[in-house]
Amino acid sequence: MKKGNKLALGISLGVVFGSAIGLAIGNLALGTGVGIAIGAAIGSYLKQKQSNENGGKS
């Protein structure tokens, strides 16, 4: 996989899925906010995982 900013990837995917969920439940603001929070958590996890695989470099 191409190196990139994992946090930005997680947040952007969170916004997409959060917006879709927000539209489905009729509350776009809540869905987007929850999506950003979950996306940031996933992005941080992926960044930490990548850092551990590289021996702490990154």
Image (tube, helix red, strand yellow):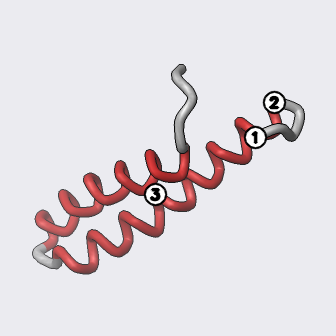
Query: What x and y, as percent, mark residue 30?
Result: 27, 79
- The residue where tag 1 is placed is 58
At label 2, counting other C-alpha atoms closer than 10 Å, the crowd grade (few under 14, some 14-19, many 20 or more) is: few
> Mark 2 is on which residue type?
Asn
Q: Observer-nearest residue: 30 or 8?
A: 8
Distance from disc 2 to disc 1, alpha carbons, whole Å, reads 7 Å
Q: Observer-nearest residue: 24 or 36?
A: 36
Could you tell which of marks 1 and 3 lies nearer the N-terminus? 3
Q: Quadrant of residue 49?
A: top right
For this view, does 31 lie left or right of residue 36? left
**What quarter of the picture does the C terminus occupy?**
top right
Pair 1/3: label in front: 1
Distance from disc 2 to disc 3, alpha carbons, whole Å, reads 22 Å
> Mark 3 is on which residue type?
Gly
Residue at x 87%, y 40% (from the top left corner): 56
Q: Label 1's element?
A: loop
Please say if the residues under marks 2 and 1 sit with CB atoms less than 8 Å apart.
Answer: yes
For this view, does 20 lie left or right of residue 35? left
Residue at x 11%, y 75% (from the top left corner): 26
Above or below, 23 relative to 42: below
Query: What x and y, as percent, mark residue 18?
Result: 28, 62
At label 1, counting other C-alpha atoms closer than 10 Å, the crowd grade (few under 14, some 14-19, many 20 or more) is: few
> Mark 1 is on which residue type?
Ser
- The residue where tag 3 is placed is 39
- The residue where tag 2 is placed is 54
For this view, does 49 lie left or right of residue 42? right
